[in-house]
Image (cartoon, rainbow, N blue to C red):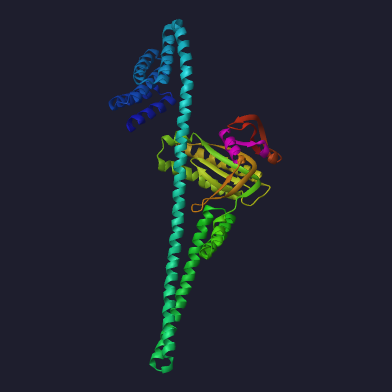
Amino acid sequence: RMRAKNYESLGYSYSKINDYGKAIENYKKYQFLSNKLGDTQGEAASFNAIGQAYFAKGDYNNALKNFKKALTLVKSIGDREAQAQLERNIAICEAKIGGGTARTELQDAQTEALVFQERYEVVRDSLLEARQMVMEAQAELEDKEAEIQQKEEVITTLEEAQTVLAREKEVLAMEKEIQDKLILYAGTGGAIAILLLLIIAALAVSRSRIKTKANRELSQEKKKSDDLLRNILPEPIAEELKRNQAKEARQQKQKKKGQKAAKQAKALPLVRPIPYQQVSVMFTDFKGFTTVAARTAPEVLIQELNECFNEFDEIIERHNLEKIKTIGDAYMCAGGIPKPNRTNALDTIAAAMEMQEFMRRWKAEREKNNQSTWELRIGIHTGKVIAGVIGKKKFAYDIWGDTVNIASRLESASEPWKINISKVTYDLVKQQYECSPRGPLPIKNRGTVDMFFVERKL
C-alpha cells in the first residue's frame, strides 16, 4: 500500500509540473498495485487520475475511457459523490468529442455534481475536525506524560534527601546512647569513660560531616524541585503554591488534634483564582498542518513543531508574555498576567509580528530543501479573564473567560500570514500600529465582531 501511495504522489507531482507522460506512467503503476491489493477505491482513484492527465493533454478519448472505468468501480462500492464527479467529467469529455450534442446531459450532471460536492465538503470538514481532535488529544497526553515525569523526578530527589536525614538520625541516636552510658560509667574515672569520650568525639565529627553533606544535598534537591515547579508555573504562582502547600502541611499535622483544624485544611485552596481586568490573549494556528501531518512521520512532525514552538517560547519571553499551553498545532499565550500591566496589547502584537517574521524565514529555508511548510495565522483579543491553577496533584496554570473564547474565534477567522485583532485591541494599539479594517464578521456562537488586520508598526 505504501508503494501504491508513493506512485500516486509521484503522478501528482509530475502533473503539477505538466509532465503528463510521466504522470500517467506512475498513475498506471498505482492502478496496477491497487488492483493487486483489492483496493477498489484506490483503483478507481487511479483511473480518475489517469483520465485527468489525458484530459489535460487534450486526449479526450483516452480520458473518457479511464473516467468510465473509474465510474464502474465507484458504482460497485456505492460512492455517490465520486460517481457524480465522474459523470460530470464524462459529460465534459463527450461534449469535447461530440460538440454540443451532450450539452444538456452535461448541465444535468453538473447540477447533480454540485449537490454531491456540497455533501462531500460537509463530510470532509467533519473528518478534518475529528482528525484535529485526535491530534490535540495526543498532544495533551504527551504534555501530561512529560509533567508526570517531572513530578516523579521531584519525588525521587526528595526521597534521596530523606534517606540522608534518616542516616543522620541514626547517628544522633547512637551518640545519645553512648552519652547515657558515659553518665552511667562516669563515676569510675577509668578507661571506659576515656574510651567513651573518644568515641563521642569521633561521632561528633562524623555527625557534623554528615549534617553538612545532608544540608548541601537538601539545598541542591530543593533548587531542583523549585526549578521544575517554575518550569510548570509562572514564578509568582509557583511561590504562592509553595507557601500554601506549607500551610496545608501544617494543618494536616493539626488534623489529629481536632475536626476544626481538619475542616480548615480542606477549605484552603492551593492557589486562589485571580481576576484580571485587561489581558491580551493570543492564539496561533498553522494552516495546512492537518494535510502535512497526514503524510508525515509522527517523530518528524513533533520535531518540526518543537522547533517552531521553542522559538515562540523565546519570543514571548522577550515581550513579557506568559505561555499558557499548546494544543496540537495551536499555541496559546497572554500578556498582562500574572503581573498586570497596561502595555500588554502592544507587547502581544509585537510578539505576534516577530512570530510571523520567524515563520517566513523558516518557510523560505525549508522550501529551498523541498520540505513541507506551514503558514501561520494569529488571533488576538483583549479583555477580562480569571487566572489560576487547576488540579491538586498535576498542576496547570490556565485562564478562563469570554476573552479567551473570542481570541480563539479571531484566530479561526484570520488568514495565513495575518494578525487578526478585535476592535477592543485595535483601540489600544492604533496609535502605534497601522491596521486595515475588515468590518463586522460572524464568529461561532458570538454573532459578529469588528475585526482588523495588523499591517505594520507606525
- Residue 355 to residue 437: above or below: below
Please, which residue is most extreme toward the right here?
A: 431
Which residue corresponds to the image point at 42% horizontal and 24% vertical from the top-left?
Answer: 15
Please, which residue is most extreme toward the top here?
A: 101
Q: Where residue 400 sits in the image (x, y, percent)?
A: 59, 44
Please, which residue is most extreme toward the left here?
A: 36
Q: Is residue 287 magenta?
A: no
- Residue 106 to residue 148: above or below: above
Left/right placement of residue 196 relative to residue 266 reads left
Q: Write the start and end of the magenta stretch as one range.
A: 404-425
- Residue 150 to residue 327: above or below: below
Q: Where residue 234 sits in the image (x, y, percent)?
A: 57, 53
As rendered, which of 131 and 434 lies closer to the eye? 131
Q: Where residue 431 sits in the image (x, y, percent)?
A: 71, 40
Residue 352's quadrant in the figure? top right
Which residue corresponds to the image point at 54% horizontal and 40% vertical from the top-left?
Answer: 359
Left/right placement of residue 2 relative to residue 361 reads left
Residue 47's quadrant in the figure? top left
User: Which quadrant, please, contains the C terminus?
Assistant: top right
- Residue 142 to residue 161: above or below: above
User: Which quadrant, please, contains the N terminus?
Assistant: top left
On the question of residue 143 being in view, the answer is yes
